[in-house]
Image (tube, helix red, strand yellow):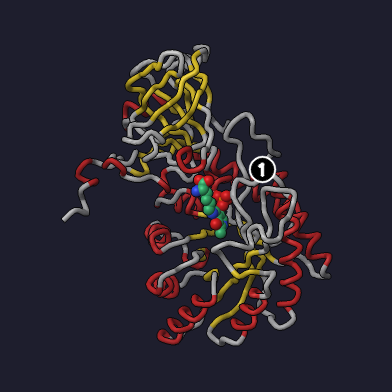
Amino acid sequence: NGTSRVNQKGVLEIGGCAVDDLAKTYGTPLIIYDVAQIRERIQAYRNAFQFFQVPYALAYASKAFSCKAMCRLADDEAMWLDVVSGGELYTALAANFPAGRIYMHGNNKTSDELEYAVSSGIHHIVIDNFDEINRLVEILDKHNTAMQIVLRVTPGVDAHTHEFITTGTQDSKFGFDLFSGQADQAVNVVLRQPRLTLIGLHMHIGSQIFEAEGFHVASERMAELFSRTKVNCDTLEWFNMGGGLGIRYTKEDHLPPLEEAVKGLIEGAKRAFERVGLALPKLIVEPGRSIVAEAGTTIYRVGSRKSVPNVRDYIAIDGGMTDNPRLALYGAVYEASIANRMLDEPTMTVSVAGKCCESGDMILWDALLAQPQPGDLLAVSCTGAYNYSMASNYNRLPRPAVVFVERGEARLVIRRETYADVCTLDL
Ligand code: LLP
């Protein structure tokens, strides 16, 4: 996928850079991002919106992978940025990302985070609950200023099933519940606050979603709320459909091309608003995974092997749950290859273990690989989203380095942690 290929020496090459060279220069584990692929994914979203000629904002959910270089790339692509914490906001501002294209999410933004958001002049805050309305108004009073806001609504749709059991995600820690009337109540509270300008409604129904149906049902419910709200609110102009489009982690994941999937969402929203007699408002989408996941590849060095007679063969790598906790957390399934011997037939079934003191520290179970030897490079694909951003220093392992590759050039964007870094906060 993207710009990766196998070179004449049988080595995996990404963005025109051979991964054995990258491993030599930057060490392992190493996370490599194929920048051209990120740009392609962004373009797929843009094509879909341009096809319908609807006004839109394409935001990047920076929780998927945030660092200054990623924020600069998003800015370069004229994206908006969804931040969910003071730390993500700080990263964006440190990268000179324009505040006017940033908005903030979070189910428990602290007063400090709200103050930070207000004083930075970000475009809007996505309000999650009644306490937050009060807290934000207090801060705005103190600073004698006003803020644009969007309300996060839980439309009660289970994104992963055909049965839209209304109590499904109604029971969520996020947002105002639609069914019990909380969302309408929140609208009323906000409209009475002169310091708040309600500019939109937001939903996010889940992540790694393969079916459009959940989006359609949720859009219908949101369109109804939008139409009720609009009656008393001239400033309402945005419908944020959230993120959540799935990606292809393995050959077993079947899903349409990204552009088609996005078109499906827009089409569904259009129909939903037509049903309530409204033109489509300005749309926001805030994908994370579908922008960066497939562009990321993690390169590890194979270390020890262990064979349990008649049970299983293991190899161990120089990273693990510290840089990729997704198998341990979600049972995530990945595909991998021996990056320095791509032309060798994968003939050995082997499980890939990390180096942490924990049996659950696995990266792959029973993968088919080309007889891995100590010293080989293992490439695990689709590790661009929720990997580095969820990395930890468990066992005091330094976190890996991250490089961006594009047109044959590699650029270090996050340096590898040193042992001294690991102790840097210790007093
Ligand atoms: N908007 C909101 C409000 C969200 O909560 C999320 C993700 C997104 C957008 C971006 O969703 P995406 O397009 O990336 O699916 N750590 C988990 C995923 C957690 C997703 C959290 N919210 C994982 O590794 O699978």
Give the image location of residue 88, x and y in percent: 42, 58
Q: At label 1, which amino acid type do we have? A: Leu
Quick check: 86 left or right of 263?
left
Image coordinates for residue 274, horizontal then vertical, percent: 82, 65
In the figure, residue 38 lies in which quadrant?
top right
Viewport quadrant of the C terminus: bottom left
Q: In this figure, which residue is indicated by the disc labeled 1?
A: 258
Figure check: 408 above or below 242: above
Residue at 31% in and 31% down: 27
Residue 20 is situated, as x and y percent measured from the top left of the image, at 38, 23
Residue positioned 47% across, 23% down in the render: 12
Res. 79 in view: no
Q: Quadrant of the N terminus?
A: top right
Q: Nearer the viewer, residue 339 or 167?
A: 167
**Foreground residue, 247 or 393?**
393
Q: Residue at x 42, y 25 (%)?
A: 378
Q: Would you say the beta carbon of the disc 1 residue lies within 8 angstroms of ligand 1?
A: no
The correct choice, above or below, for 327 with respect to 94 in the image is: above
- Relative to 224, 355 lies left or right: left
Q: Residue at x 52, y 60 (%)?
A: 82
Kindly tell me whether residue 135 is visible in this rendering. yes
Residue most extreme to the left: 427
Q: Residues within 10 Å of mark 1 (few under 14, many from 20)?
A: many
How many numbered tags mark residues here? 1
Query: Residue 202: x and y, percent?
Result: 62, 65
Above or below 415: residue 273 = below
- In the picture, measured across the screen, residue 33 lies left or right of residue 304, that is right
Determine the image quadrant of residue 187. bottom right
Mark 1 secondary-structure assignment: helix
